[in-house]
Image (spheres, grey):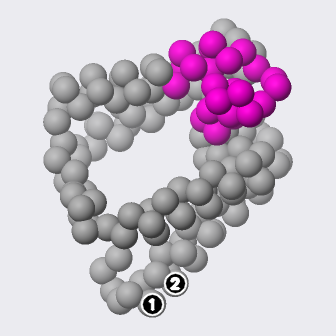
Amino acid sequence: MTLPFLAWYWPLLGGLMIGTAAGGFLVLTGRIAGISGLLANTLGLSRSGDRALSSLFLAGLLVTSGVALAIRPVPLPSLASSNTPLLILAGLLVGFGTRLGSGCTSGHGVCGLARLSPRSMVATGVFMFMGMATVAVVRMIIGGGA
């Protein structure tokens, strides 16, 4: 699977927008913009946090994604040939991992590292290592081009 080439400024613009959103959310609400925590608040799985605020933040992510896609449509590879049960299992494992690790890449990797949180430094290191190890193992199992 190959993603389309993006000019150098699109990732930079995306990073600036993520940083601005996370920093603004922290300044305005005093809360970390960790997506797994916001989703837990929205679904009522967490006792901390404002459910309406979490819902609005997540809705904003969906709306801005739609706006970005409308402005600059990018064709993505089809997932029609993908193994649906495997994708569901992978999603459930990711969800379990974020609950077990008390956060996800946005909470630890974006917000936690910016605050120099030792726990987030360890969590992000583990995320990165496991991602690289998973790619290496999958490539060994299914062959080169994964």
- In this rendering, the count of numbered labels is 2
Q: Quadrant of the N terminus?
A: bottom left
- Identified at 77% across, 40% down, the residue is 116
Examine the image and state in which quarter residue 110 appears.
top right
Residue most toward the front? Answer: 85
Q: What stretch is highlighted in magenta?
A: 35-58
Could one spot residue 23 in this view of the protein? no
- Identified at 65% across, 46% down, the residue is 104
Q: In which quarter of the image is the C terminus?
A: bottom left
Residue most toward the top? Answer: 28
SS under mark 2: helix
Residue designated by label 1? 140
Q: How far apart are marks 1 and 2 (CA)?
A: 5 Å
- Identified at 74% across, 48% down, the residue is 99
Q: Which amino acid does label 2 sit on?
A: Val
Examine the image and state in which quarter residue 129 appears.
bottom right
Residue 39: x and y in percent read 62, 32
SS under mark 1: helix
Q: Main secondary structure of the magenta part?
A: helix
Side of 61 relative to 83 (left or right): right
Residue 78: x and y in percent read 21, 58
Residue designated by label 2? 137
